[in-house]
Image: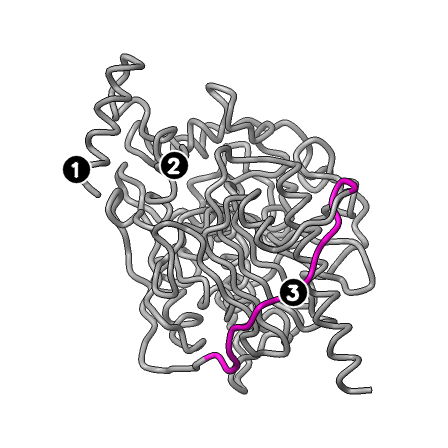
Amino acid sequence: MADVTDQYLYRDALTTGKSWWERQGDLIMRRPFNEWTFTHMNRLLPTERVSRGGFRFPLAGRSRPLALTYRFDGREYTLPDLHRRTFTTAFVVLHRGELVHETYPGTFAGPRARFQLFSLSKSVTSMLIGIALAEGAIGGLDDPVTDYRPDFAGTAYDGTTLADLLDMSSGVGGLEKWDVPGADIKRFEAACLGRGTVLDVLRGARRTALPGARFNYSTLDSQLLGWVLEAATGRTLARYAAERLWSRIGADRDAYYWLSRSRPRTAIGGGSLNATARDVARLGLIMSHEGRIAGEQIVPRSWVRRTAVRNVPHLAVGALGPSGYDHYGYAGQWWTLAGDHRAFAGLGVHGQYLFVDPVADVVIVKTSAWPTEDDEPRDRETITALSRIAEHLSARSAVLTA
């Protein structure tokens, strides 16, 4: 595959007149190349391992067909339709803690493949913040960022609290637009890949609103949150995740964070975790079961419940404004959904999903290789299908127990 990759990049350079170095961010993301890159990020960037330790927790149950349809834009579709239409690479469904369905349509996918989770990493960072808060490493959510990172005094983040970062309400930066040259997220991407430094990008971001006043989705906020966690715990993000989370969930494989090429190298708390689909499902199991897995409390129950918060006006479903789709709200680095089941999801660009319905006790992991970073119709279709699966499994359980 390496030879094919080199030939692909060489042809692209001849066609565009630009080198791999100039276009690497776009090339990593482009179909069909991204089917490979999204499962081989450790071949492209430096990494830090997140060790699984010695504890094992095999998922009970077995995969079987899910014979259902979902209705989207006036038509009925099957799950194979979903996978074809939304470029699914891995799909894992848990119900009541057991594996009930699993498939890997991706070319390089399989149970042992580790998938690039992109911004789904933000939700994992949130879980780690909850653990650090319970341990006392972090004093409180009203603490200013500068208590942990005094080098941000005098920047746009001066006066921002941890709660503001968690809820994407820092008031720093503009809209996160991947197709706009010079946007904060494009400068951030360039710094991760070695052009400039990630620290300079964050320190140079501009204030655009008062802290806590409005929602503005921002990977920069999540990156700073990860740095706060590292400063508070005295550990790298990967090491803290290994000690407090990964080694306690019975993971199948080590995970890893890729690191910025620019120095000092840093994990991207808002987007560089890579893990197997089954292990991501274990994280969803924790969130569905109020912080517990294998009989042990991993994430504080109060922190998990905070994810369901929907009473902040500018974070309510449908109220996020131009940086969030109308079918989502937001709380603590998770996207919230309407309805009595109070479902929520961790999301990543190009179609990465960790869907949790705590009422139906359903967890669904879907990794994908979309052609573009964001795609509202594909996202809406995916959430429609995942919600339908939860509804189907919940109804079937009700019949079986009646």
Q: Earlier in the sequence, mark 3 or mark 2?
A: 2
Please report contact status of discs 1 and 2: CB closer than 8 Å, yes or no.
no
Q: Is residue 363 left or right of residue 256?
A: right
Q: Is residue 237 visible?
A: no
State the image coordinates of residue 145 (x, y, percent, origin top left). 53, 47
The residue depicted at 56 percent of the width and 31 percent of the height is 176
Q: Is residue 44 visible?
A: yes
Amino acid type of the residue that numbered disc 1 sits on in the rendered structure: Asp
- The residue closer to the viewer here, 335 or 132, is 335
Our reading of the magenta stretch's main secondary structure is loop
The residue depicted at 40 percent of the width and 56 percent of the height is 230
Q: Is residue 14 magenta?
A: no
Residue at far left of view: 3
State the image coordinates of residue 235 (x, y, percent, origin top left). 35, 61
**Few, some or many C-alpha atoms within 10 Å of disc 1 (few <14, some 14-19, many ≥20)?**
few
Marker disc for residue 67: 3
Q: Earlier in the sequence, mark 3 or mark 1?
A: 1
- Secondary element at tag 3: loop
Q: Is residue 84 above or below residue 257?
A: above
Please report contact status of discs 3 and 2: CB closer than 8 Å, yes or no.
no
For marks 3 and 2, give the one nearer the viewer: 3
Q: Is residue 210 left or right of residue 227?
A: right
Answer with the quarter of the image where residue 85 lies.
Answer: top right
Point out the stretch of residues depicted in magenta: 59-74
Amino acid type of the residue that numbered disc 3 sits on in the rendered structure: Ala
Q: Is residue 319 left or right of residue 68?
A: right
Q: Is residue 399 above or below residue 220?
A: below
- The residue closer to the viewer here, 215 or 397, is 397
State the image coordinates of residue 116 (x, y, percent, origin top left). 40, 50
Circle 1 sits on which residue?
3
Circle 2 sits on which residue?
32
**Few, some or many C-alpha atoms within 10 Å of disc 3 (few <14, some 14-19, many ≥20)?**
few
